[in-house]
Amino acid sequence: MIKVILCDDHALIRRGIRDTLADAEDIDVVGEAADYGELRALFRDQSCDVLVLDINLPGRSGLDVLHVLKEEGNPVKVLVVSMYPEDQYAMRALKAGASGYLNKGSDAAQIVAAVRTVSQGKKYVTPEMAQMLVDNLTTPAQEDAHQKLSDRELQTLVMIASGKRLSDIAEQLLLSPKTVSVYRARVLEKLGLTNNSELTVYAIRNGLV
């Protein structure tokens, strides 16, 4: 039996994934968490084979969680299931230690197949992601400016472009408004932009939102 823990701050999303996995006789969802704090508490009492993890969590992001698990040497296999497009976040997640990446729009069969694959210690990518990896190997890489951003800077960029105020971002990420302002300033500098409107246009043009 493959034991799975779900970590997503939206209860409806967790329920949808739980219901999907419930149809697989060899998979058992043994716990759920809405953020990193709940996940840590859950890990103290419950082990699992696969962690199904969202990127956009309050406080520590899913990418932060991946880095922590990697640093601690936690053997759990992580399948990232996120709303963000593969071409922007999959490589970051895999480099951070994820075993697989799926968009939340994936069908039920893909989610079940992904959980089974990563539980065996293998990597899971969609055919689209596999093609992207092949393209990167066979053509000269042209790095977009936002690929130089840190995980937290990229998260700040996406949230600003989605219309969130700095105070809202600070509250969701459990950071001070001053810290979020620093991230915003770094993003503007690295991308050569001057204001939130330009950030939003950049994000839209590059498929970040």
Image: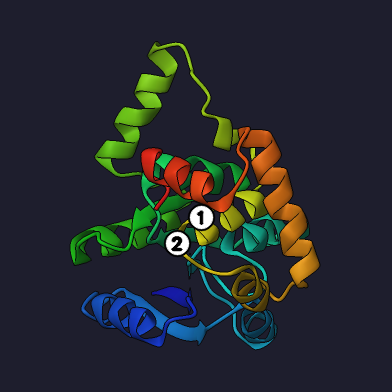
Residue 68 to residue 143: above or below: below
Callout 1 secondary element: helix
Label 1 sits on residue: 158
Quarter of the image that includes the N terminus: bottom left
Residue 27 to residue 130: above or below: below
Residue 161 or residue 78, whichever sits in front = 161
> Where residue 136 sits in the image (x, y, percent)?
42, 21
> Where residue 5 sits in the image (x, y, percent)?
49, 77
Residue type, numbered disc 1? Val
> Where residue 28 sits in the image (x, y, percent)?
37, 80
> Residue shown at 27%/38% (left/top)?
128
> Residue shown at 60%/48% (left/top)?
195
Label 2 crowd bin: few (<14), some (14–19), many (20+), radius 10 Å: some
Quarter of the image for residue 10 reads: bottom left
Residue type, numbered disc 2? Ser
> Residue shown at 66%/55% (left/top)?
152
Label 2 sits on residue: 162
In the picture, measured across the screen, residue 136 lies left or right of residue 49, that is: left
| Residue 117 seen in this snapshot | no
> Residue shown at 65%/42% (left/top)?
188
Q: Which mark is residue 3?
A: none
In the picture, measured across the screen, residue 143 lies left or right of residue 182, that is: left
Residue 64 to residue 85: above or below: below
> Where residue 203 sits in the image (x, y, percent)?
45, 45
Residue 162 or residue 32, whichever sits in front = 162
| Residue 38 seen in this snapshot | yes
Residue 24 or residue 56, whichever sits in front = 56
Label 1 crowd bin: few (<14), some (14–19), many (20+), radius 10 Å: some
Q: Are marks 2 and 1 in contact (CB under 8 Å)?
A: yes
